[in-house]
Amino acid sequence: MPKGLLSTVVGNTPAARGLAVDTLVGAAPRAVVLAVSIHCRDAGCPVVQRFITGPGVPQSVSQPMAQVATGDPVVILRQDLLAIRRTARPPHLVLALPGELDLLPFLVELRRPRIGASALGDHYVPAPVVAGLDPAALLAELGCVHRAACLWDGTAQTSPLTPAEIAARRMEAAHGVIVPAPPSPTDRRTDGVAALAHHLNPSATLVQIAQQPPTAAELPPPLLRPVPDALEEWRARLEPVTVAPSRPGTTPAAVVTWRSAGPHMELHEADRWLEPGDESAWRGASPQRRTLASWFWHDYDGECRNTLTFTGADLDRDRLCSALDAALLDDRELSLGRDGWAAFPDPLLGDFPL
């Protein structure tokens, strides 16, 4: 018997998650939906609630799932998914997860084989992760760094994360992002959120839904196809450190990205800065990047700029600012220009002690 397709859906609001679920179901009418809510406690196991809907699900499966369960969400949901596959055997199952989960580590733990138990991978192939996005809520989340919450990552609760960090993690995990059409032609929030989403996850497919209920034609076919190496991709994103091979000297023309959360850090050369006369590079850049480059353009530095955001509890602001100020070039070093800077050791991607 062929394996079922397992889509994972998240959202930054219940309505956004619902829109993403409706869009998938509109494109796959025989899909079964397992919607989950989790209430994390300060101590002890979370409270897990599930609701299942779709064709061919017997009451012997749906009734037990309607009851509140207390325990490890990974264990509970794995049992639910296997029970659905054994009885209803849906060709497509949509798993709608709540915002209380740290998505990538949770998905890795959900698919991890257990001794003496049936593996989820024996019954389902993973489909792309789809995130429903409410533009107004995302802008509010990214601007909120004064409070924090803990997420469930499949084995324990994370360290406190701000809404901005949670929003960024959600976006970075998605293969597809679904946003509602703006309520009026003059509302430009969707365009701004599209640019933000592209910066957080350049590879994600952005889908704007203009109809209610959504139609099958609105969902790109790749979001309904298996992702054969999804588990390896998720694990790779969770590796503690990923640093490009070392090389001598700095490269002032390189765009270097730095992403870190807790013990996880990623540094890599992502691109080259746009130059005024390089027409082919400008044509090859995304519309969002061309827009932002023009917006922040400097007569001397061009597109080059640094944007660092530090979030977390009990940050030492003065110490962070002192460390960043000490990393800047002094006037003598600055006067050397790019040719002189290229001779400096590269502290980010070069052969430097960490």
Image: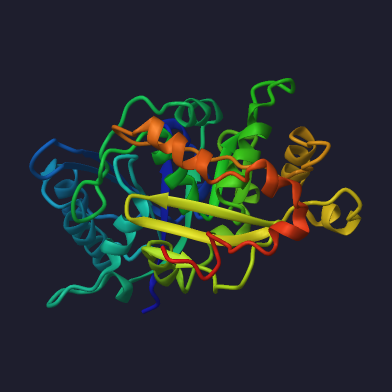
Q: Is residue 65 above or below residue 83?
A: above
* Colour pattern of the rendering: rainbow
**Count of numbered tags:** 0
Which percent across, then down, holds residue 346? 58, 62
Give me the residue at 46% from left, 53% from top. 173
Which quarter of the figure has residue 240? bottom left
Which percent across, then down, holds residue 268? 56, 62
Which percent across, then down, holds residue 18? 44, 37
Tell me the quadrant of the picture where the N terminus can be found: bottom left
Which percent across, then down, holds residue 313? 30, 33
Q: Nearer the viewer, residue 301 or 345?
A: 345
Q: Nearer the viewer, residue 16 or 219?
A: 16
User: Could one spot residue 172 in this view of the protein?
Assistant: yes
Q: Nearer the viewer, residue 101 or 314?
A: 314
Give me the residue at 79% from left, 36% from top. 298
Give me the residue at 38% from left, 65% from top. 239
